[in-house]
Amino acid sequence: MQKGTPRKRPPRSRNGMRREYRFDYTAARPNRFAGRIRAGAVAVLLDPDVAAAFASAEAVNALLRSVITALPAQGRGRKRARAG
């Protein structure tokens, strides 16, 4: 391909995603936040309005623990989150 010639992009599917993405892994960097995650921890994304209600991760965990104690004993098992 000549310099300055625009590359053709593959067509996008109905959901807006390409069939294939090519990443430049030579530009990748280590995850600078990996050291903050404790062993066995699970990361969960909160919507911005929900996150704004909490001052810290400890506050979120305290509220969730109080909700867990209020659940019936049969509903306390860990289940996998559903995607979507």
Image (tube, rainbow, N blue to C red):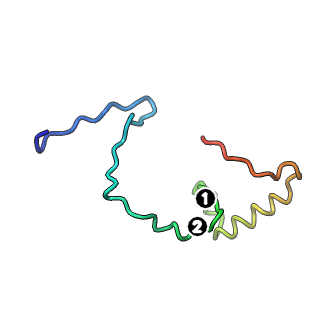
Measured as percent of width and height from the top left, residue 80 is found at 69, 47
Instruction: Name which residue type carries label 1.
Output: Ala
Image quadrant containing the C terminus? top right
Measured as percent of width and height from the top left, residue 28 is found at 36, 59
Please tell me the numbered disc located at residue 27.
Answer: none
Measured as percent of width and height from the top left, residue 76 is found at 82, 53
Image quadrant containing the N terminus? top left
Q: Secondary structure at mark 2?
A: loop
Q: Residues within 10 Å of mark 1 (few under 14, many from 20)?
A: few
Residue 65 found in image quarter: bottom right
Q: Nearer the viewer, residue 70 or 32?
A: 32
Measured as percent of width and height from the top left, residue 71 is found at 85, 53
Query: How far is mark 2 from mark 1, CA to CA?
Result: 8 Å
Disc 2 to disc 1: CB gap under 8 Å: yes
Please tell me the numbered disc located at residue 43.
Answer: 1
Q: Which residue is mark 2?
A: 37
Position of residue 78 in the picture relative to residue 27 (left or right): right
Q: Secondary structure at mark 1?
A: loop
Position of residue 41 in the picture relative to residue 32 (left or right): right
Q: Nearer the viewer, residue 46 or 41?
A: 41
